[in-house]
Image (cartoon, grey):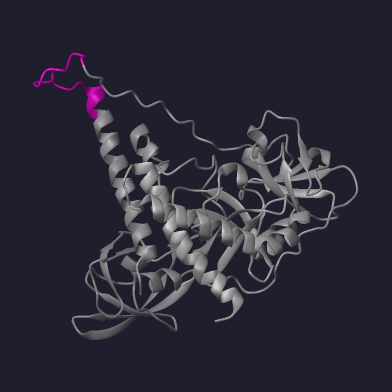
Amino acid sequence: MNHKHSILFRGLALGMALSLSVSAQEEDIPLLTAEEASAVQAQTLEIYQTLSPLVRKAAPSVVSVGAVAPNQTCYGAVIGDGNQVLSKWSEVAASRKPLRVIDSTGTVRNAKLEGVYETDDLAVLRIEGTPLPVVNWSTKAEPALGRFLVAPRPDGKAAGFGVVSVLERPLSEAKQAYLGLMGDLEYNGTGARIKTIEPGTGAAAAGLKVGDVILKVGSRQISGLMELRNSLNDKQPGDRVEVLYSRAGEEAKAEVQLGGRPPTAMPTNPRLRQMEKMGGKISRVRDGFSRVIQTDMQVEPQQCGGPIVDLDGNFIGLTVARADRTRSFILPASEIISTLKRPATDPSVAKVEVTKDEPIRPQMSRGQARPPRMAPAPDAESIERMKRHVQDMQRLMERMQREMEGLEEP
């Protein structure tokens, strides 16, 4: 095992241990003893030290926007002529601090907003002073599952590390190719069995039925739900694919025209929205990106906007969001290169679509009068509110099921 692979496997083990440790602290579950937690912390420091040469090399192309760590608004990647910075638009827009950046030498530079790419929540800043070393975005193939990734800081330290947990895919639902079916999570045989089919979709029009087992999409053999999902990663809504399936032991083929995934409505119930936040702060804008690489890297919202490197020092993307406890999103280098070829939106007309959270009513404290067991008959408004909550729960369950499908082992 070479040195880089040794780092990788140690990192994976440490990442799992750290996740357990964080969960234990947040949920008050003693998953690790004091001795184990101390060992994890010591090894974590060791791996950060091991990564130091890598992040120090990348640091001159990384800046803090707003202030120095840990009080920065976000991070940024130096691009263009060395006097431009690519960063996270929603964090820049929400900051009340003067617009400035601090480079790896600690030099404070004035900055102004030059343009915005709203779809991917990106801002382009123009900075003063001597040009800085620019990020050389990787043109290599996307990083493989399990590939070790590091988020460098301007001070030469690592903001976080993790692995690729889901391959590159569109996160804007309208751009996600959609067969129009739901897989059966309980099926353990060869292929992927259909549990439900959405009316009016490509799968329904092609004659696929509940209980059919999908064996192949195009030339790609399907070994499970993960493989079925991955088979559509390079497809677009409107594409046609040939599907080989088995029905009652007989194989047949169907041509399916792919649609776009229907949008998932955000929950209106504040308690359901709070469930998304379990595990720490999440980014204001954390969905709808053109394409993302998903990672288990645990970064704070104000640590987004900076570049990501692999163990070979390749700049493979930029952190665009902390989505929840287990997911952070990276905009891949190929998408960044493509995006920067297009003109940016004028900042004066760019908007940030952020839903303001509603406060959660405090729970009844001890000593307060409890409501009677027999509640009055609900009025029309209460019934409508209950319907919305039921719909929220259904949407949440559908979303969780899609996530489980995406993580199902082949």
Q: Nearer the viewer, residue 250 or 313?
A: 313
Residue 333 location (% of width, % of height): 66, 63
Q: Which residues are magenta?
A: 367-383
304 with respect to 170 (left or right): right
Is residue 353 shown above or below 226? above
Asked if residue 364 lies left or right of residue 309, the reply is left
Q: Is residue 247 left or right of residue 230?
A: left
Q: Is residue 134 something that shows in the picture?
A: yes
Quadrant of the image occupied by residue 179: bottom left
In the rendered image, the quadrant that contains the C terminus is bottom left
Left or right of 167 in this view: 99: right
Is residue 398 part of the magenta span, yes or no?
A: no
| Residue occupying image coordinates x 18% and y 81% | 248
State the residue in front, 158 or 194: 158
Q: Residue farthest to the front?
A: 35
* Rendered position, 399 above or below 193: above
* Residue 210, image quadrant: bottom left
User: Please, is residue 368 above or below residue 242 in the view?
Assistant: above
* Residue at image coords 20%, 85%: 249
